[in-house]
Amino acid sequence: KPTSVVGNFSGQIDFQGYELSINKMGDVAGIFTNIGPDGEVSNAVFNFKSENGTRVYDDGILCNYNYGHIHDVIVNYKGGSNVANQYYGLLCRTNASTGLIERFVINNAPEDGLFPFVADYEAGLVAATNVGTIRDGYVYGEDIYGAPTQSRGGEIRIAAVAGTNYHLGEIENVFSMVNVLVAPPSDKDGKANTSYGSIAGLEQGRVQNVYGIGQSTYTVPDADTGETYDVDSIGPVVGANTDNCIGVYYWNEKEIAYPSSTYQTQISLETLYDYDWQENILGDGFNVQPVEVGYYPQVIISAELPAQELIPLPERDYADLVEVMSAIVLSYAEDGNSAEVEFRLSNVRNAWVEELMIDGL
């Protein structure tokens, strides 16, 4: 049975790029009880599982409370059991007011036979609750399986980064490709689940310069309406409507809008391919060069860690990427069967044009 470092850990551990694998079996303590204000954990690859027969309650796999500094970490969540985990995060249960989590990559990628991250109430891949600062990182992989056992709908506080971002909490320069699968209202006495999203569930602090990809859906179609998602809910990035959301953006493949989310802005696919936009949103903590060749940005992280996976941006329709603005005939051949023509193109994304075809020729 694993044991944890009891009390506040106040040292510094530099993993120098090495891996640490933990399978959290049942409701046992994390690696550290708490990481203290002077504590620091860095340069690590964590492979986490939670094949627990009972729920994880009020804990994290790395630590319970983080008062210190967690940075330059890659977390591979290898999956777990389908149990009603509550107040649960991978890096910590709570990122406290002095806590700083930065330069992170989290992949929700369960092994065969295991579930992706499962949560019933107030949980997130980074932290269940955030009162400190979470910045410069991203999460990807499979969606979170949310609220499997609640007999009633309502507020669930589940998200890919932080389930709840409390009043002092700050989340900035982050993007997420992980959403939350929730039960339809017909499974919850007709009452919809609320307060879930790809970045934060319940939001009371500040969320700035972030974006989410995709949208949360129901685990099964709603028996009453047949719908598979709820556009009347607040989301899809943050599960609360607050003016503390500044520069919060979302994109989904079906171009579904969330009109009730007045502080979250829908963007086009072309925006994701906009190098300057990505740089302005994510800031100096990211390398946005991959965007120019069709991949998501990568966080600037310790060179001791493995290379990050190149994640393709959603495919786009190149048919509308280049537009012919005008065509001018410069000269005709003497036999009249050919001509020299000058075409003026609108090609704002500097796409590579291999061929120009003219109908009827």
Image: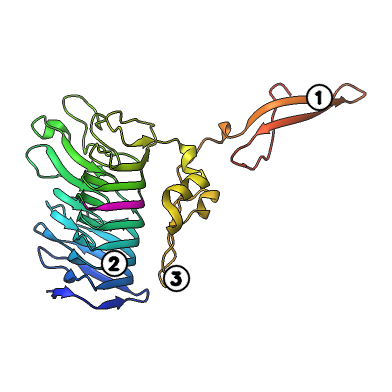
Q: Is residue 286 above or below residue 218?
A: below
Judging depth in this view, the residue of 328 and 38 nearest the camera is 38
Q: Quadrant of the N terminus?
A: bottom left
Give the amino acid at mark 1. Val
Q: Secondary structure at mark 2?
A: strand
Please give the name of the residue rendered at 12% of the width and 68% of the height, measured from the top-left corner.
29
Q: Crowding at label 1, few (<14), some or many (≥20) Cα neighbours within 10 Å? A: few
Q: Can you see residue 1?
A: yes
Mark 3 and mark 2 residues within 8 Å of each other at the beta carbon: no
Dot 1 lies on which element? strand
Q: Predominant secondary structure in magenta?
A: strand
Closer to the N terminus: mark 3 or mark 2? Answer: 2
The stretch of residues the image draws in magenta is 168-174
| Residue 310 in sight | no
What percent of the width, then of the height, locates residue 72? 36, 67
Q: Which residue is mark 3?
A: 303
Can you say which quadrant of the picture contains the C terminus? top right
Q: Which mark is residue 227?
A: none
CB within 8 Å, label 1 to label 3: no
The residue that label 2 is drawn on is 70
The circle drawn on residue 329 is: 1
